[in-house]
Image: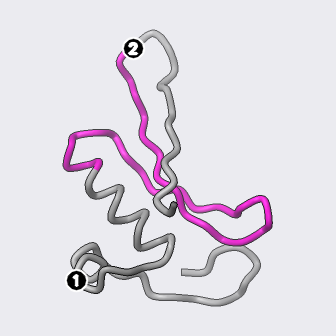
Amino acid sequence: AVLGNAGTSEVWADMHTTLASRKGDAEAHATLLCSLLLGFRLEAYCAMGTTSAGEPHMWVVTLDRQEPELPPKAVFWESLF
């Protein structure tokens, strides 16, 4: 996938590869976190964008639709600490 203005492409690892290797970049950690949150039956999505420094990055977004008359509440999760 090509993200941002980097003009480079990369292959994203699946969650099993990330777990087995015990390492990964932002995309690997975000897809793993998203899979975990989906397993907990949360409405979760991976969101791609750029950091304030202009670097490509991926976050996880969950939507809370508990109040149908209001727009869903979005929570952004950072998978790297």
Amino acid type at image mark 1? Ala
Q: What residue did someone put label 1 on?
A: 20
Vertical position of residue 14 compared to residue 69: above or below = below
Residue at x-position 26% and y-position 83%: 17
* Number of residue marks: 2
- The Cα atoms of the two marked residues, 1 and 2, are separated by 40 Å
Q: What residue did someone put label 2 on?
A: 68
Q: Are marks 1 and 2 in contact (CB under 8 Å)?
A: no
Vertical position of residue 34 compared to residue 62: above or below = below
Local crowd size for mark 1, using a 10 Å CA cut-off: few (<14), some (14–19), many (≥20): few
Q: Earlier in the sequence, mark 1 or mark 2?
A: 1
Tell me the element at label 2. Answer: loop
Disc marking residue 81: none
Residues shaded magenta: 37-66
Find residue 51 and report its horizontal and vertical position in percent.
71, 61
Residue at x-position 42% and y-position 81%: 12
Local crowd size for mark 2, using a 10 Å CA cut-off: few (<14), some (14–19), many (≥20): few
Amino acid type at image mark 2? Pro
Q: Is residue 41 magenta?
A: yes
Residue at x-position 41% and y-position 68%: 29
Residue at x-position 65% and y-position 90%: 8
Vertical position of residue 65 compared to residue 3: above or below = above
Find residue 20 and report its horizontal and vertical position in percent.
22, 83
Tell me the element at label 1. Answer: helix
